[in-house]
Image: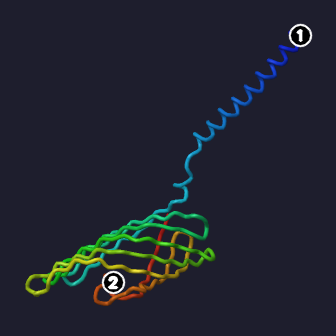
Amino acid sequence: MKNLKSFYRNYTIFIIVFCLFSAQMMAQENTYNQKSDFWNHVRFGGGIGLSFGNEFFSGTLAPSAIYQFNDQFALGLALSGTYNSQKYYYKSTILGGSIIVLFNPINEIQISAEFEENNVNINWDNRLGFANENYWYPSLFLGAGYRTRYVTIGIRYDVLYDNKKSTYADPWMPFIRIYF
């Protein structure tokens, strides 16, 4: 009888230890097998621009990515590069980046704020007598648009606009924003 009690006691201890060990192993396995959910919330987009005219060329490439925190709020980063040239006048390179915040109070309406910082490098034609320029220019855009799934069409305003230094012709700018 003593051996039987000892057997049951050892058997019970063995079962408890085995269950605890198995639960610990399964918890570790689940932790290691879980993939990060980060990339499921990242959306990519950007812009491409080309403009041709009377001995004028302008090209822009601007990739961007946002992190969609929920259905209403997203935060992102963008890079941009633009090359402009007007024959016998100037050539310019504009390189920069921005931080963008998107808020959708309802699914169809998007409100945005974007801080952009650009390095502007202008090389004037020597015959004009202007000194070449290299400076940093900030922009702070506040905007609103109509959104359908991946596309938002709207208008934004640069509250820091300076008509002598801005890389844009006007503080009001229409936009089309696409994120997949």
Question: How many residues crowd around disc 1 within 10 Å: few (fewer than 14), some, or many (20 or more)?
Answer: few
On the rendered structure, is 18 left or right of 29? right
Q: Residue at x 37, y 87 (%)?
A: 161
Measuring from the top left, give residue 17's x and y in whole percent: 73, 26
On the rendered structure, is 92 left or right of 41? left
Residue for badge 2: 168
On the rendered structure, is 99 left or right of 121? right
Q: Nearer the viewer, residue 68 or 11?
A: 11
* Amino acid type of the residue tagged 1 in the rendering: Lys
131 is higher (above) or lower (below) than 22? below
Residue for badge 1: 2
Instruction: Classify the position of the N terminus by image quarter.
Output: top right
Q: Residue at x 28, y 74 (%)?
A: 119
| Image quarter of residue 107 | bottom right
Question: How many residues crowd around disc 2 within 10 Å: few (fewer than 14), some, or many (20 or more)?
Answer: some
* Amino acid type of the residue tagged 2 in the rendering: Tyr
